[in-house]
Structure formats: structure tokens, C-alpha cells
Image (cartoon, rainbow, N blue to C red):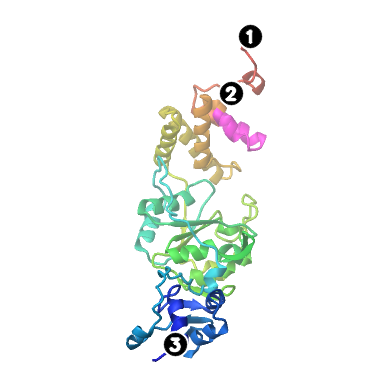
Amino acid sequence: MKYSTRKLEILNSLYSTYPAGTTVTSKQLKEWSEKEGFGKHAIWFIARSPNTVARGVYKIPSIDSTLSDTISTTKPVPAKPAPVVAPTPDPVSNLMMSTDIENMVPDKFTGFVPWGHYKDIKSMIKSKIFYPIFVTGLSGNGKTLNIQQSCAELNRECVRVNVTIETDEDDLIGGFRMVSGETKFNLGPVAIAMERGAVLLLDEIDLASNKIMCLQPVLEGNGIYVKKINRYIKPAPGFTVIATANTKGKGSDDGRFIGTNILNEAFLERFPVTMEQPYPAVATEKKIIIGSMTKYGKLDEEFADRLVTWAEVIRKSFYDGAVDEIISTRRLDHIVKAYAIFGNRMKAIELCVNRFDEDTKASFLDLYSKVDEGVDLEGPPSMEEDNEDTSSI
């Protein structure tokens, strides 16, 4: 293509700022033309159909080699580095907050002892087959810990969601949040777990309302359409769902787990497997307690043996209907920690059973005194005696 002297002059000047082939916007072109004194002629010359890349974006044309000698002999100005023209932003990405969580693999629990359905849960997670699991059992028996430690052992990411009556689609799938004065869409834990191929742990699922029904397609192994950002999210390989609950989704008749709800039958049917998590056997629980004592720096094997025996008797009484309360494995761990702090068996036990009513507390303490004949039933000194200032004595 042959260019007039005027056009060659424009190109010669233009190349000192934008080399041939550079992509520029109409705004950049206008600012350059006004600065160089070419007026609208330069804009019209460059911004025409052969040079148009997109609306408002143009490519600087090159000069035919046969005309290279006709270009002005004016001393060339060193070319400036070509400006970086930012790509047109993705409208969806611009709406979303960045997810910069690098690693969601749970930490390994010091002194963890596998029990219950640990091996089965680990096998299911290891298979990377989508297979939702519903784990139910009384409080404090290690349901959540077993799942997290399975993921830790297999180096699998685990996204834990603590469900409440208020949990809804916005909490689970995602919603708009205010970030630095801008409204951004924040992906929820369910969507993040799906994208990362992680294990989604829905903890205390029986506390949920019917708003949890937004997870129906997720529990079928399908993707979800996020209508607020017009985006379809598919589950990555390895994604699966595990839910924990103190009930089987039918509510709590005895009132022990107040706040639990009757879950939709169609929702429960999406879980092909239900595992009933028991408290560990005496031998296993003793290993757990010794592990806790080792972790807290107060090893006392005799005390560990007395504690698990005491807890086992109480549980049998509970199942027989003789008592209304139970001593969980978690509460035994609380007692061990208190023992490491105070160094007194009876004080540790009493502090940790104070949560029960007076009759239950008295019966539990009396039972322990029979299991551990060497313990002082009168218990530790009173709070006043404990806190008495003896520095002047």
C-alpha cells in the first residue's frame, strides 16, 4: 500500500511511540494525536476498517518496504517501549473475589487413635468416587475427627461447613459481599470444594432448615448453575460429601439435641450410606486417653484406666435408662487436660461434671470414688481455700 507524504509523516512520528503492529485504544490514539499536533486527521487515518481489531481498539499499520526510502529523514527518535494494553476483563471474573486459600488439608492430630468407621471412611475418600456418607452418633464420640484425620492421612483437602438453622444458599454456594467499597461475588464453601475436588464436610447437618435443599444437585454428583454470576460449576475428580449429625435427621425425641430438625426425606435419600458411630471400646478409649495425657504432659496410666472404666459403667447405665446423662470421649479428654493443670484427680473430674444437674453430678462423683478407691470423695479444697493468699504465712 502506498501512502501520501502526510500519512508517512504521521506514521514516522507514530512509530516513535507505538511501533507497527502495536494495539492501541481510541483513547490512546486521541491523546497521542493531540500531543503531536496532528488533530483528527491522524485518528481518521489509523482508525479505519483495515486497522480495526475490535470496537475502539486498532492496530498500528506497517509501511510497505518499497516506500522505506521515502520516509522522512528526520533523526529518528528512540522508540518507546510498547505500552501494555490490558485485555478486556472477563465480566464474571471482575465480579468475583479471588480465592487465595492455598491448602485446606487438615493438620494431623497428635495422639490420634483410629476407631469406629475410620477405615471405611478412609477407603471411600481414597477411592475418589463420589459417594455421599451420613455419619450419625452421640456427641463427643469422634465423628468429625475421624473424617478430618482420614483426609489428613490421605493428604486430601477438606472443606468443613458448620451448619445452623440459618444456613442457606448464600452461605453454601456463594453470594455478594462488600470488598473495599466494591460489591464482589464470593464463592461459598460448597462451590470451592467442588472446584478443588475436596471432601465437603457438612457438620451438624440435622440443625439445618429446608434451605439446605439447594444442595440436591450437589448430592447427586452434578454441577450447579450459579445464577447470580451466570456460571456453571462442575465437581472436580475426588469431590465427595460427608455429613455428620447427632440424629438420623428425624429430630430428637428426648430433647437432648434441641434445635435438631426433621430433614426432608428426599434430601436424606441422597445419602446412600449411613454410618452409626459408637463410642470407642474400653481398650481403644484407654489408648486415646493415654495419648491425651502424653500430649498434655501428665501421664498417669492408672488414672487413665480408672477413667475409661468409670465412663463405660455410666454409658451402660445410660443405655439401660438408669441415668439421663453420659460421659463422652471428649469429656474424658477435658478431664485429662484439667488434671494436667491442677494435678488433682477429683478436682479435674468435678470441674468437668459441674455442667450436669446436682443429682447426676453427685452420682457420677460417687461412682468414680468406687472405681478409684484411693481417691478422696470429699474432693479438692474449696474455691476460697484454693485462692487464699498464703504468702504471709
Asked whether the beta carbons under mark 2 and mark 1 sit within 8 Å of each other, the answer is: no
SS class of the residue under badge 2? Answer: loop
CA neighbours of label 2 inside 10 A, class few (<14), some (14 to 19), many (20+): some
At label 3, which amino acid type do we have? Answer: Thr
| Magenta residue check for 361 | yes
Please state, as top left, top right, bottom left or bottom right, where the C terminus lies in the image: top right
Q: Residue furthest top?
A: 393
The first of marks 2 and 3 along the sequence is 3
Q: Which residue is mark 2?
A: 379
Q: Main secondary structure of the magenta part?
A: helix
The first of marks 3 and 1 along the sequence is 3
- Asked if residue 225 can be seen in this view, the reply is no
CA neighbours of label 3 inside 10 A, class few (<14), some (14 to 19), many (20+): few
Residue 326 horizontal/vertical position (percent):
56, 42
Q: Which residue is mark 1?
A: 392
Q: Residue at x 44, y 60 (%)?
A: 199
CA neighbours of label 1 inside 10 A, class few (<14), some (14 to 19), many (20+): few
